Image: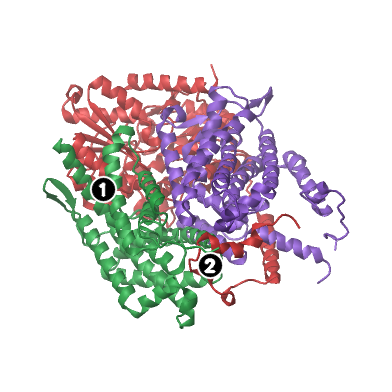
Amino acid sequence: MFYRETGVFKTTYARDMELFPIPLDKIGFTVGLVLAFLIIPLFASHYLLVGIFIPFLVFSLAALGLNILTGFAGQLSLGHAGFMAVGAYATVIMYNRYDVPLPVALLGAGVITSAVGSIFGLPSLRIKGFYLAVSTLAAQLIIEWVITHVKWISGGVYSTVDIKALEFMGWKIDTAAEKYYVALVIVVIMAVFAKNLVRSRIGRAWMSIRDMDVASEIIGISQFRYKVLAFAVSSFYAGVAGGLVVAVYYGSANIEEFHLMLSFEILGMVIIGGMGSVLGSFLGAGFITLLPIFIDLSISSITHNVVDLSKVFTPDLLANAKNMIFGAFIIFFLAVEPLGLARLWHTIKDYLRLWPFPY
Amino acid sequence: MSDTVLFAVELTVSGLLVGLMYSLVALGFVLIYKASGIFNFAQGDMTFFAALGMAAFGALIPMWVGIILMVGAMVVLAVAIERIVLKPLVARPPLVLFMATIGIAFFLQGLAQGIWGTQPRGLSLGVTDHTYEIGGMFVSSLDIVGAVVAGVLVVVLVWFFQKTKTGRALRAVSDDHEAALSVGIPLRKAWGITWAIAGIVAIVAGALWGTRVGVQASLALLALKALPVLIVGGIDSIPGAIIGGLIIGAAENLAEGLIGPAVGGGIKNFFPYLLALIVLGVRPYGLFGREIIERV
Amino acid sequence: MLETEAGDRMSIASGSQVGRKNGYSQVPSKEVATMSRNMKLRWARAISLVIAGSLLMAGPAAAQEKAQWLPLLCYRTGPYAPGGSGICGGMEDYFDLINLKGGIDGVKLKWEECETAYSPPRGVECYERTKSEQGGCCVYHPISTGITYALMERASADKIPLTSIGYGRADAQAGGDIFPYVFPLVTTYWSQVTGKIGYIAQKEGGLDKLKGKKIALLYIDVAYGQETIPVLKALADKFGFELGLFPVPAPGLEQSAQWLDIKRRFKADWVINRNWGISCTVPLKEAARVGFPRDHIIGVWWCGSEEDVVPAGPAAKDYITTNFHGVGQNFPVIQEILENIYMKGKGNLPVTRVGTVYYNRGVIHGIITVEALRTAYKKFGPVPINGEQMKWALEHLNIDENRIKELGAEGFMPPLKTSPTDHEGGGWVRFQQWDGSKWVGISDWIPPMKELVQAEVKKSAAEYAAKKGQK
């Protein structure tokens, strides 16, 4: 009853097209922003910021990029971690060696990754479905090889490049809260951009390619232009996410951080969060990032407060139980809501439309 | 000059034999995709599960009993997967099913190591890894056994699909399952059988690879080696898996041996994928894959 | 409503992804197992209750007696689990032993494992979660080069020392201002590789006999594998042997091309096996296949455990590897653990693993931790010890022959003497050979070629400092 569209009248085109037409949605979003910008940095512990919120933000951005490519444009890609690696090393090289200011370095990393991604996206013009997925694996492997072997990029035998002390125009970014802000600002801006992008003509073109590409080609949508654009935009997001990983999360760029399993994890975030949904990228990133920690904490708290699990099960079984629970959770979740958490959220909102009335 | 030629020939021969062993892993993928349209990411972990089970049993009971037990376990696993994972996800997009198989992969890896521990084990099938020198080249007996087994398996599978009733039923299901339903072929049973057969193929692959490199969790990464084979051969073609394996095996060895030193080495991992990309450029569904005809 | 979400389109879209491919995605609607909306809401409610419940339960245990808190970064899952479980198990058993004997000056040790699965993000998360629990931590053993890199900056900023015993950045042994909180104790890869070349020279009849020989480095193509290449090149220049580089892309399941090259084209005399995980075992089988003598393969100590050679079966016989601690159960300290812990029915691992390479590696980790704590307590008084005090202790370790005898570790660990500019403390290595069923020590403690290593360390540390923008 409170969450409804009735009684909301639009009198200008701009209002009609706005992101949050329902007033309660607007309030909700504002509350969310206040929470993110004010409450969390002030009250969250260092561990929560560094161990939970910053990785959540960074991986949401990566998931958002992949969602644009796979969820909106329908091109399955398994090389996302490789693109993040490109962005990470590009950021570090520009910031460390050429003293490029931090935001420009991040942006530049995004552009460079965009270019790399577009090249690896060219096969999508000929190949579809799982064939395309496997050929994007080539991107992941080739990028790994190039970074490990080209010393100019990897900075010597250790292939690890630490980023210099972060600072921007005299503002030293060294506390966890400050790093959190950097990540938050960038993620919010890029998320809003993505949300608008997928509502635009480009987004509709992508969705038409995803749904029926032959039909979309017939009505005149250039497959070449939009597919490559999808790869380019998605890689841009991946590049910036990779740059953020280095700048505010790890502090160093190491190719082993961007291994193949990360690509699968980000794909998992997209699928579980909901393909073709900006909100879904965030929900999925939260789910996949937090689930292992949650399982760890549950087992640890059960051990402390209820029964010492390490006496009941062998350490092997206990450690591997986390893998098993994780896998089982993914399957269970997909069975319950295969369209993702975003769909679950929509179902809840639908329910709220009528609440407290039954129908 | 002839030294390099001999070297190249040796690389090729060894590569062809290894390629056949890749095909064994790829066959599992092909079977499941062919019958149910699912890209089973868990195939690598199924191979690991099978290998680890056999290694663990082999320490306690005679090998042939262990193999029978393992076959039973894989059948149970197939039925469980079909009932718990696939049934609720019927009619979902293939990407969701792919994600579900990733979940199965995690689960299987945890299960295998939870039950049998994380220690690497050796596996011996009574096949000694003896090296013969033929015409100045080294050929390993295990490789030859692997090649023979792969050949036999392909023949058996092709005979199964062509000549037996169940095999024909499975082919009908993969061709057009609505028509198959309408002639009374039980779909879910067909899918269960397919996963069981894929499980048995995983046992064979796991046995051979386990003997070759030992059994530990990294065995699951064989899936990555098998993917280019799938692409080159075609995701749904059994002979394609063999031909693809031969091509990839030889090519990757030749590339690493001849081109590798010039560029700093280590190209063995991505070269097969590059090759697969090139093949896809010419034939977008692999060499023997079925072409999808879309209607608007 | 908001813009068309993909969710509405999915059922229509499933057609296009694989065209007319039949399969699970195209089963007629009567077989579709959809959950009604009410069911979904019920599930959503149930899940949120479970989550809320567990989060309410979560919290640190209430333990208030005076104890030294040690969070342990362990990995008992994943492809490297044998190593991680062995080391953590050995360490924890040693801590148990110390507690049974009354602790360190009466202070008992308390620890908790945090599973990192050898993954840097999990390692970072574990570190951040545990570093301020229970009064704060004093030292971390990441047991993983990747996690060490990820934690180096953080730990230095938090002033908590990181050890990298037998792994990690070799140039961090310079300590000082550049690597104040990183301790590659006992020995580093660079010291090890000079030891290896020295051993090869010994076998060939002298350092001068190395000239003209061919030594192949077979390494996994990641940072860890490439680490010793500069030092090897310097050694090759100095002693005149030819160095061949053979990278193996991870995970290294299949290495036939590399081995054919090593045997046929490069015709190596010696091979250094610098791999990790399954890529350590495969070379032994490949070498057997091409007929390369296993006793001319020298492996690093992360390729020199029972888990690496047992799967290779008879092909592994006579394989030589380095180590930085003793192997086997024949040491007083290991016997003590067996008697007091395993015979009493406790113990972290199956008793068959006691005395294996990784287990003993864990014990030496434990010994160093306890000795460092002892040194810290002597200077700063008992618990709590903070990171800076631990750093001081780690820089003033002096475990000499007498102390080693007291600890029951004679022949088990080399003497260890650190200083603020020497975070390594010795650099000794020894060699062992696989006789088909166990490792047998075949050498004494061999010192590294100090001047060469120091020259490389200085160079590399200076580069690192320059890159970081320090003076």
Which color was chain B given? green
Q: Where in the figure is residue C157, as x and y percent of width and height? A: 59, 29
Task: Tell me where residue A17 appears, x and y as whole percent.
Answer: 78, 49
Badge number at residue C438: 1
In the rendered image, residues at marks 1 and 2 fall on the same chain = yes
Which is in the foreground here, disc 1 or disc 2? 2
**What is the CA distance from the residue labelled 1 to the residue labelled 2?**
54 Å
Residue type at tag 2: Ser
In the image, A236 versus C344, the foreground residue is A236
Which of the chains bears the disc numbered 1? C
Residue A95 in the image: state x and y as whole percent: 57, 26
Q: Is residue B119 above or below residue C105?
A: below
**Is tag 1's residue or tag 2's residue first in the polypeptide sequence?**
2
Q: Which of C48 and C160 is in front in this view?
A: C48
Tell me the SS state at disc 2.
Answer: helix
Which amino acid type is shown beneath numbered disc 1?
A: Lys
- Tell me the shade of chain A: purple
B53 to the left or right of A202? left
A222 or A145: nearer the viewer? A222
Residue designated by label 2: C25
Question: Foreground: B98 or A7?
Answer: A7
**Residue positioned 34% across, 71% down in the render:** B69
Q: Which residue lies furthest to the top in this view?
A: C471
Q: Is mark 1 on a helix, strand or loop?
A: loop
The colour chain C appears in is red
Mark sitting on residue C456: none
